[in-house]
Image: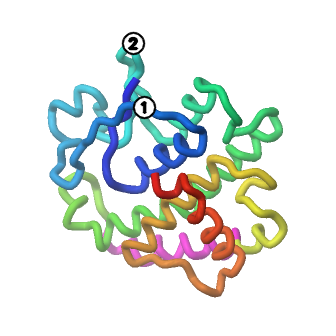
Amino acid sequence: MRLYNSVGPNPHVVRMFMAERGISLPLEAVDILKGENREAGYLKTNPAGQSPCLVLDDGSVISEITAICEYLDEKFPGDSLIGKTPEDRAQTRRWTRWCDLNIIEPLANGFRYSEGLPMFQSRMRCLPDAAPGLKAKAQDGLAFLDGQLATRPFVAGDKFTLADVMLFCFLAFGSAVGQPLDPALKNVGRWYAATGARPSAKA
């Protein structure tokens, strides 16, 4: 199998997840800045034009970063980043989904509709008027999470999981595109620094 890879937070999630799990796969670069992911050659592989995507040995394709990570977690031996028990997996999925809806999506679309508008306006429907509200919604989500992280070391509980990987990669991206962490959020800041110190964060 091979992973179609590019710049951006979504591929970073999968690479960091793989690094944490000790998984190595061939990478095939896709130049999304030049719009290669919207060209016919790539669209034959992934009609949605998303990056990353995972092509299996039988030619089938898995897109969506949570689906890719869960597949790799089940496919390869080692310590799961989803959870060993139904209860652990439920909490990981709960908080991964919560972060996605309340922080990651508003943060990402806040960028696409403002600083990223020159790149995205020809590729998707953009709502520039919504950008300030979306950025504020992401900050609201982080403020809530700050309270949660006062009582546990990681997003989903006592163990480092996919929820931590996803949130870290998007917050690192946000910090680079005009949506920095609020220094008043001490618990999020502590968690972010600790996660960024993991070797996998550089994947």
Against 12, is 193 above or below? below
Question: Left of 98 or right of it: where is 154?
Answer: right
Against 145, is 158 above or below? above
Where residue 83 sits in the image (x, y, percent)? 74, 38
Query: Which residue sits at x=69%, y=52%?
Result: 95
Start-end of magenta stretch: 127-145
Say few, some or many: other residues with alpha carbon within 10 Å of mark 1 (under 14 / 14 to 19 / 20 or more): few
SS assignment for the magenta stretch, majority: helix
Res. 86 image quadrant: top right
Q: Secondary structure at mark 2?
A: loop
Q: Is residue 141 visible?
A: no
Where residue 110 sits in the image (x, y, percent)? 40, 69
Residue under label 1, please give it.
25
Q: Secondary structure at mark 1?
A: loop
Residue under label 2, please give it.
58
Residue, far top = 58
Which of the two residues, 62 or 169, is positioned nearer the viewer here?
169
Say few, some or many: other residues with alpha carbon within 10 Å of mark 2 (under 14 / 14 to 19 / 20 or more): few
Q: Determine contact: label 1, label 2, CB under 8 Å.
A: no
Res. 174 image quadrant: bottom left
Which of the two residues, 122 or 161, is positioned nearer the viewer here?
161
Amino acid at dot 1? Leu
Query: Which residue sits at x=45%, y=74%?
Result: 175
Q: Is residue 37 visible?
A: yes
Question: Left of 1 or right of it: where is 161?
Answer: right
Separation of disc 1 and disc 2 at Cα? Answer: 15 Å
Tag nearer the camera, 1 or 2: 1
Query: Which residue sits at x=41%, y=47%?
Result: 11
Amino acid at dot 2? Asp
Against 19, is 63 above or below? above
Query: Which residue sits at x=22%, y=33%?
Result: 42
Tag count in the figure? 2
